[in-house]
Image: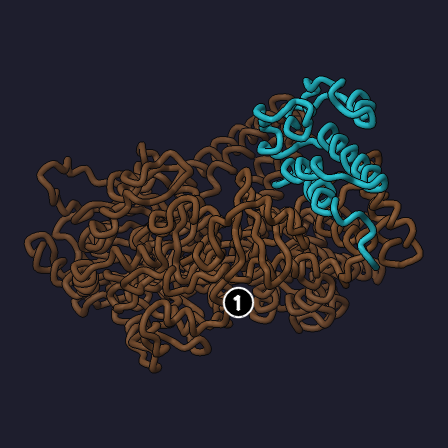
């Protein structure tokens, strides 16, 4: 069976689906940041939105997330939410900076302890 | 009206007369009894006879069920066959005396060798798992009580002491007839006197209790309370009897278990019969200790090892003691059996167990072999006088000495079972326990300082005892009671804990079983034999060979053992073994003015039921008991591990390599095994002198903290293979996608089972299993089974060229060869293993190490 998802998002998907699912994500932020520089097709954009939503859901529902993921890099722009996962988990991230497709998920979930 | 209670008593007496060895079946036996009773004028109808037969048969069934229950309790172990084993062993436990299998213990119901063999196998397992004897006993008792009829005390009612029956009768009489107060008062006076005479027996407190209860019942005018008091008295006696059986049998079984549990251990080559330093009598021990079977002097092959021991040596509690030295330990055991009374011309009189050694003109002789006309060494006066200037010269009984010791501050006592076969059969007369108290923890041999000085490094982490105080300065109660004691003067305890000492003076319950009954400890430092590796493989989580000690658990560090044994200790041990040769001379020469030859004018043998005592005296190991010089003796059976030189190995590492990989991993401590599994060769994990593994601290220092920790984490991931259990969120879209993929394959049996399992477990699942189904059915990977998930992980960690990254303390190990990376938590838990993209790899940056450089 051929890989069923977009190749260019594969690494990021791995980080969310295999790693963040267990509270891990060694290179999640880096890969998401790299993707932000790509010109994606519509399908890829849709898939990215899906993976992002999955990431936000995990951050806001898992009982525990690795500390290194939640150590925000404040040198990075706040609009790059992937560098501010700690704020997202604690619901201190300004929701208006999130893409609309993530805002609803963000609002729908309670904060979690860091 | 038929007096059934009386008939049952008659039946019981008849059984006792036959010592439980009843020929034929229940009906025949009862028929013979009925004939006798009729001859005496009893009227026994066929119906009554049938009733008695039925009663006897049901007792048999009850006992059989009770023992079967006990066996079931004992064998209630995971992985062991239940009903087949229980059935087989129950059958073994009952021998041909009864066609349908009733077995009577020779303590109470006359178990014979066949029964003992059967129970041994079961009790061996119970001993291995630490099954509670008390529970087993109570289970047996409860089963017997719950049997139909509720008359299960009848068979032991005949053993109720007459005075109890008389007191009960007098009490009940007074309750119903106030005129009988005179009889009651007279009975009470007799009972009081009787109880006073029980001071040397263990039943005194129980006697006082039933006496008090009956008096109170009479005072309150309640017959039912008096009946209840007697009932509980009988219950206690019956329980005591069962306890004696269970403990004795279990103790015997444990002794056999020591041997049985090591028979298949390739590292154990045989068993050494080691003479105690104070072995006083030339007897079978000397033969055993000099036997030569090609394994070294005194070392038996596994199939030839003696199953019994040889050291009985107890005197009765009222024996007056004078000790020519320090009392280092005292033992107390309940004993029921023959004792020997020796009376001398100079009015010396000593009562002791048959094998207690007494100094005679011909040397040390066991009491049972002392005859009229023999000359024994005794004090010139009833009070041999003070040996030490500060001695107030007030003689004490041995019971007083024991009680003083046990009540002293800082002294610990432990109670350990003894085997019936120990004490040359004297142990069989004991109640299965010996209580041991150490006065000051002195060791018997001169190697005490050698071990003691290294004890400061002992990594005990429990108890309040500081290592420095453990040996020599006093005994930490909690530590002592939990772990037993160090070698030589130590005793082992009947717990699962294993004492661990750097320096190798470990003392292992099951192995020391052979030693504990006679008061001497298993001395595992075999420096005298130039083999520092006396240790044992234990059946549970403690691996004993080669010994290891870790700071956080209790294993026996052989390496430290070897490190702390030096030639001076070896010499002192050699010297200590010669002590016995001098003890006779010491006794005679050293105290020439105080002792004399005393002719034995009478030797009596009688039964005794009560406590017996013994002392350990430093340094001569003998003492005056009622003026007669007697001795204690502490020879040991010590399992011997294979001498690496005998195996043709150059050193420890070499020896280890010759073992199978499974055996190696079994014997190495976890933290060593992990690093070894990761690829660090054994040579690097062995001390430079080749005598054991390196210490954890030493290795950590040589590797550096970060490398050591990484190696531990990776090694643990490799050896332990632990995965987290996740709660799958059905609301999460990523999980929904996986579940959706699985639903699409729900017709596949594998998938259906998994989905059902998810539902029933409320979506809690091992991540290993979850990943398997996700990789296979959602991502289309070619993967055959859940085990492949582990195989992927293993393939990464087994690649010496795999690169190790570290992110947030997680270890990411990437193997080009396996085309996967594995993510591991700092505690060694597996997170995931998959084929990363180049972007993921690039994002990791430079690796910290390769596996080969990590463990280099």
Q: Quadrant of residue B562?
A: bottom left
With respect to residue B382, does B95 lie above or below? below
The residue positioned 74% from the left and 63% from the top of the image is B83
Q: Position of residue A32 (x, y in %)?
A: 69, 37
Which chain corresponds to the colour cyan? A
Q: Taking B288 as reference, is B87 left or right?
A: right
Name the foreground residue: A33 vs B502. A33
Q: Residue at x 39, y 58 (%)?
A: B547
Q: Quadrant of residue B732?
A: top right
Task: Assess disc 1: are there few (<14), some (14-19) or many (≥20) residues with their C-alpha within 10 Å of its C-alpha.
Answer: few
Residue B470 lies, with reference to residue B9, above or below; the image says above
Which residue is denoted by mark 1 in the rendering? B662
Q: Is residue A30 visible in this depiction of the protein? A: yes
Question: In the image, residue B232 lies at what x, y percent?
Answer: 62, 38
Of all residues shown, which one is farthest toward the right? B747
| Chain of the residue where label 1 is placed in the rendered structure | B
Q: Secondary structure at mark 1?
A: helix
Between B740 and B632, the one lying in front of the other is B740
Chain shown brown: that is B
Looking at the figure, which quarter contains the C terminus of chain B?
bottom left
Quadrant of the rendered structure where residue B629 is?
bottom left
Where is residue B28 shown, x and y percent of the image?
74, 70
Q: Quick check: B510 above or below A75?
A: below
Q: Residue at x 58, y 33 (%)?
A: A68
Left or right placement of residue B458 versus residue B5 in this view: left
Q: Between B721 and B542, which is closer to the camera in this rendering?
A: B721
Seen at 65% across and 22% down, the residue is A78
């Amino acid at each position: 069976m051929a890989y069923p998802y977009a190749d260019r998002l594969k690494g990021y998907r791995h980080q969310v689906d295999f790693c963040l699912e267990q509270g891990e994500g060694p290179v999640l932020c880096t890969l998401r940041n790299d993707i932000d520089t790509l010109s994606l097709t519509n399908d890829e954009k849709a898939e990215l939105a899906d993976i992002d939503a999955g990431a936000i859901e995990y951050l806001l529902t898992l009982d525990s997330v690795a500390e290194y993921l939640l150590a925000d890099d404040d040198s990075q722009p706040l609009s790059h939410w992937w560098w501010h996962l700690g704020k997202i988990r604690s619901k201190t991230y300004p929701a208006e900076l999130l893409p609309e497709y993530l805002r609803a998920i963000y609002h729908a979930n309670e904060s979690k302890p860091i | 009206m038929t007096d059934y209670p009386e008939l049952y008593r008659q039946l019981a007496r008849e059984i006792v007369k036959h010592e439980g060895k009843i020929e034929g079946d229940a009906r025949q036996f009862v028929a013979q009894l009925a004939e006798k009773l009729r001859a005496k004028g009893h009227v026994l109808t066929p119906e009554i006879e049938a009733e008695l037969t039925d009663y006897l048969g049901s007792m048999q069934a009850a006992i059989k069920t009770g023992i079967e229950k006990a066996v079931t309790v004992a064998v209630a172990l995971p992985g062991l066959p239940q009903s087949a084993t229980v059935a087989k062993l129950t059958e073994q436990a009952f021998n041909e005396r009864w066609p349908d299998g009733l077995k009577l213990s020779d303590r109470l119901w006359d178990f014979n060798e066949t029964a003992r063999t059967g129970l041994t196998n079961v009790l061996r397992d119970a001993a291995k798992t630490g099954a509670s004897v008390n529970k087993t006993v109570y289970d047996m008792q409860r089963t017997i009580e719950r049997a139909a009829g509720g008359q299960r005390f009848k068979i032991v009612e005949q053993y109720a002491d007459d005075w109890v029956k008389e007191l009960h009768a007098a009490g009940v009489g007074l309750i119903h007839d106030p005129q009988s107060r005179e009889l009651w008062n007279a009975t009470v006076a007799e009972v009081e006197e009787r109880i006073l005479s029980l001071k040397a027996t263990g039943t005194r407190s129980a006697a006082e209790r039933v006496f008090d209860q009956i008096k109170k019942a009479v005072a309150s005018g309640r017959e039912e309370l008096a009946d209840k008091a007697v009932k509980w008295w009988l219950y206690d006696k019956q329980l005591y009897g069962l306890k004696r059986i269970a403990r004795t049998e279990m103790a015997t079984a444990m002794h056999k278990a020591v041997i049985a549990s090591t028979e298949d251990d390739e590292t154990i080559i045989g068993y050494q019969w080691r003479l105690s330093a104070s072995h006083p009598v030339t007897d079978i021990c000397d033969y055993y200790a000099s036997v030569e079977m090609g394994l070294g002097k005194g070392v038996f092959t596994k199939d030839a090892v003696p199953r019994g021991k040889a050291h009985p040596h107890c005197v009765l509690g009222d024996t007056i003691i004078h000790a020519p030295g320090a009392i280092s330990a005292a033992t107390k055991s309940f004993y029921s059996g023959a004792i020997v009374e020796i009376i001398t011309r100079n009015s010396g009189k000593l009562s002791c167990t048959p094998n207690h050694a007494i100094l005679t003109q011909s040397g040390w002789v066991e009491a049972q072999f002392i005859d009229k006309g023999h000359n024994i060494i005794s004090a010139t006066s009833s009070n041999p006088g003070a040996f030490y200037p500060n001695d107030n010269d007030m003689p004490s009984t041995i019971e007083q000495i024991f009680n003083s010791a046990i009540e002293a501050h800082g002294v610990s006592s432990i109670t350990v079972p003894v085997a019936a076969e120990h004490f040359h059969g004297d142990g069989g007369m004991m109640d299965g326990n010996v209580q041991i108290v150490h006065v000051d923890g002195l060791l018997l041999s001169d190697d005490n300082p050698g071990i003691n000085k290294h004890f400061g490094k002992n990594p005990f982490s429990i108890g309040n005892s500081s290592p420095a105080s453990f040996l020599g300065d006093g005994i930490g109660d909690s530590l002592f009671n939990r772990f037993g004691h160090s070698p030589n003067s130590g005793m082992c305890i009947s717990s699962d804990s294993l004492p661990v000492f750097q320096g190798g003076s470990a003392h292992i319950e099951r192995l020391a079983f052979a030693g504990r009954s006679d008061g001497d400890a298993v001395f595992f430092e075999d420096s005298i034999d130039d083999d520092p590796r006396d240790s044992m493989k234990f059946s549970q989580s403690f691996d004993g060979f080669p010994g290891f000690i870790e700071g956080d658990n209790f294993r026996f560090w052989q390496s430290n053992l070897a490190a702390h044994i030096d030639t001076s200790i070896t010499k002192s041990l050699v010297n200590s073994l010669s002590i016995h040769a001098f003890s006779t001379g010491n006794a005679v020469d050293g105290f020439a003015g105080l002792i004399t030859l005393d002719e034995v004018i009478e030797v009596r043998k009688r039964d005794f039921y009560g406590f017996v005592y013994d002392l350990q005296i430093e340094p001569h190991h003998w003492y005056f008991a009622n003026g007669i010089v007697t001795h204690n003796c502490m020879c040991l059976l010590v399992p011997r591990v294979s001498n690496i030189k005998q195996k043709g190995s150059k050193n420890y590492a070499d020896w280890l390599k010759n073992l199978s990989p499974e055996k190696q991993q079994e014997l190495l401590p976890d933290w060593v095994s992990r690093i070894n599994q990761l690829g660090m060769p054994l040579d690097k994990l062995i001390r430079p002198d080749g005598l054991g593994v390196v210490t954890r601290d030493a290795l950590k220092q040589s590797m550096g903290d970060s490398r050591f920790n990484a190696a531990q984490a990776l090694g643990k991931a490799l050896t332990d293979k632990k995965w987290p259990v996740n709660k799958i969120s059905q609301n999460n879209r990523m999980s929904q996608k996986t579940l959706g993929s699985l639903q699409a394959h729900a017709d596949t049996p594998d998938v259906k089972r998994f989905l059902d399992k998810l539902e029933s477990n409320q979506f809690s699942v091992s991540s290993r299993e979850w990943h398997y189904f996700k990789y296979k059915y959602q991502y289309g990977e070619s993967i055959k089974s859940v085990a492949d998930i582990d195989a992927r992980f293993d393939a990464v960690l087994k690649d010496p060229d795999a690169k190790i990254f570290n992110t947030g303390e997680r270890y990411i190990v990437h193997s080009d060869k396996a085309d996967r990376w594995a993510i591991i938590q700092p505690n060694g838990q597996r997170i995931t293993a998959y084929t990363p993209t180049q972007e993921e790899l690039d994002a990791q940056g430079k690796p910290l190490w390769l596996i080969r450089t990590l463990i280099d």
